[in-house]
Amino acid sequence: LLCGERPGKDENIRGGPFVGRAGEELNKHLFERQLHRLDIRREHTYITNLVKSFSKKPPTPEEVTRDEPMLIKELVRSRAETVLALGMHAARWFLGPDLTIEACHGIPHRYEKALDDGMLSGVCIPMLHPAAILRQPTQQHIFAYDCEQADRYLHGDIDAVTIRPAPAFRLYPFPVRSPHYSVDTEGTIDAPECLSVTAGGRTGSVILADDD
């Protein structure tokens, strides 16, 4: 199942999801260049949006709450085990309000959402929204990477991760003054241990707050 954020102008006119220029990018990068090796075509997927009404503005919390029952029905009816969430707002519905698309895009995540009559679960892959590369063509390689990651997961080449609470960090005093710093995450993608900071040939670190 593919879940976008809301219908655009073309979608509002033609009455279907991703039928405009963003849909053309989606077809090119995801279906024509990647999923074809699994023989997955666009007509084999369920495509929808988080919010069902057209607007040029991002989805509001009120709109998401209003249309959430329709999305849940679509997920239950389609029985989709894997969701490609296109854009930050769609990804946050599945993976939580603190998600940033910059940090999580292209990474398959296991998700669970409590419903009134049970639990909704599966794997969600956050992806850059294809409309973003129309506004910023330099981001085309990022969207292409996300599509490749979706293909790799569906092909069984990579596994999904489980989201953990974001760790709290505290900063130790860093003794070197420099206009240039290099920062790297140590640990795994879903369980960072610390941030290593390098400047002027010396290293400090940003350590977990509960690390003695």
Image (tube, grey):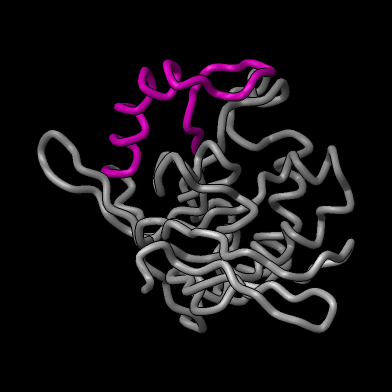
The residue at the far left in this view is: 117
Q: Where 16 sits versus 170, above or below?
A: above
x and y percentages locating residue 125 in the rendered image: 50, 58
Which residue occupies 86% across, 65% down?
Answer: 178
Q: Where 167 sits versus 118, above or below?
A: below
Which residue occupies 54% across, 23% down?
Answer: 59
Q: Is residue 166 left or right of residue 145?
A: left
Q: Is residue 57 magenta?
A: yes
- Between 14 and 68, which is closer to the camera in this rendering? 68
Q: Is residue 102 left or right of residue 5?
A: right
Quarter of the view holding residue 116: top left
Q: In this figure, what is the number of numbered marks?
A: 0
Which residue occupies 48% across, 71% down?
Answer: 192
- Between 49 and 39, which is closer to the camera in this rendering? 49
x and y percentages locating residue 7 in the rendered image: 60, 26
Q: Where 98 sits versus 190, above or below?
A: above
Quarter of the view holding residue 13: top right
Q: Is residue 94 magenta?
A: no
- Between 10 and 180, which is closer to the camera in this rendering? 180
- Between 57 and 76, which is closer to the camera in this rendering? 57
x and y percentages locating residue 51 in the rendered image: 49, 25
Quarter of the view holding residue 37: bottom right
Task: Write the start and end of the magenta stretch as one range.
Answer: 48-76
Q: Is residue 70 left or right of residue 60?
A: left
x and y percentages locating residue 144 in the rendered image: 74, 62
Q: Is residue 173 left or right of residue 188?
A: right
Q: Quadrant of the C terminus?
A: bottom left
Which residue occupies 74% across, 34% down?
Answer: 20
Q: Where 85 sits versus 208, above or below?
A: above
